Amino acid sequence: MRSFADATWALHLAGLAISCRQVTRIAEEIGDELVQQRQAKVVQRRRRQLSPREATAPAAVAVEVDGGHLRTRAAGCGPGVHEPEGKEHKLACLVPVRSQPQEQDPQPEPPASFQQPRRVQRLVRQMKGQAGAALPEELAAASAAAAEPPDDAPAAPQQRPPERARTCVASMADSRSFGPMVAAEAQERNFYQAQRRAFVADGAAYNWSIQQGYFADFEPITDFLHVLCYLYLAGWAAGRDEAERWSLYVGWLRACWQGRVAAVRAELQVWQGRLGEPPEGEAVAANDPRRLLAEAVTYLGNNQSRMDYPRYRREGLPVTSSLVESLVGEFNARMKGREKFWNRPDGPEPILQLRAAVLSDDDRLGRHFAQRPGNPYRRRRVA
């Protein structure tokens, strides 16, 4: 449910008269138990005592890492919101990849959805926040008629994605503490024994410190969705009109999709030379063209070694972190809200663990209840 109050209402509909305060207490109690269970596994892994719970390793696996945001308040200050602050919670999604290596690139051209202006702009607005929100609506509308199929065009057949046994890890901890949590989950799932392994994330430095520290033999892959956003904003910054902006974006998109990242970065640097760089030490607007170009040049430069997308596709590995991006939204449905503020520092942690248990496909919450002391179906020891 989206809140303790909603859960209380649902329980009343089920005939269980229980107060909202009691629902909150029980949820936090179970969440704290899950936190302790998670930390125990981290210790077991460090001592090399954590055994895989899955006997057979998948042929290919992916670990995707991202972060979400929630709002917090100072604890112990009485009713109301005191000293509000935004905080990031880290998420990891672990899934087997059901694909086979191929000799040729199975998709040498970018997906059609990456070349539909309205969809692209909506994605940029969602992922890039202030910079994306500052773009005018006309940028997408100008080329929409030419790039998108007409309304009477036959719809493309919808293919149901293969079922994946998804599990997830969530925490307010910093990257140094979060890395061992994700590694413990991967150890339990026998991911380290898979033949093909991918670690997919955006360009944040802490993601790659986790990869290098705990997933060094996984293929590091920069999420293509974030690359798309930087290219789109760079096209908006460089082009003189809507048609040129869209043309630049599509050209750079295709080149990066096909692995020609160095050529795109060189072209961006040419445009940067024409417009100039943002003044050093001065604040500039989020949608300043000089800033957008500089950010794109820096992003491609920092991540170029992790952007060999044709090879990843030939090896049957994912090139986007769409699964964990979707997971962020599923966590936000519970953790974010106009009037939701969590007590710092530990207020969100128990509920993050409950949410992770509910959203994982391994019935971990059911198993926890079955093994929890006080379960009426658990066999009691006779003294």
Image (cartoon, grey):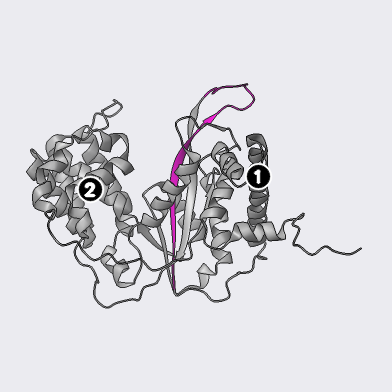
Residue 38 lies within the magenta run: no
> Dot 2, how many residues are within 10 Å of its Cα: few (below 14), some (14-19), or many (20+)?
some
Q: Of the residues tagged 2 and 1, which is closer to the observer?
A: 1
Q: Give the SS element for disc 1.
A: loop
Task: State the image coordinates of residue 103 (x, y, percent, origin top left).
Answer: 27, 78
Give left or right: position of 265 versus 145.
Answer: right
Task: State the image coordinates of residue 133 (x, y, percent, origin top left).
Answer: 27, 35
Residue that numbered label 2 is attached to: 120
Number of the label disc, if any, that sits on residue 16: 1
Task: Identify the residue at image location x=55%, y=63%.
Answer: 362
- Would you place residue 19 above or below residue 90 in this image? above
Task: Identify the residue at image location x=47%, y=38%.
Answer: 336
Residue 188 is drawn in which quadrant? Answer: bottom right
Residue 68 lies within the magenta run: yes
Task: State the image coordinates of residue 78 (x, y, percent, origin top left).
Answer: 63, 21
- In primary-sequence order, the first of circles 2 and 1 is 1
Q: Magenta part of the protein: which range? A: 60-83
Residue 226 visible within the image: yes
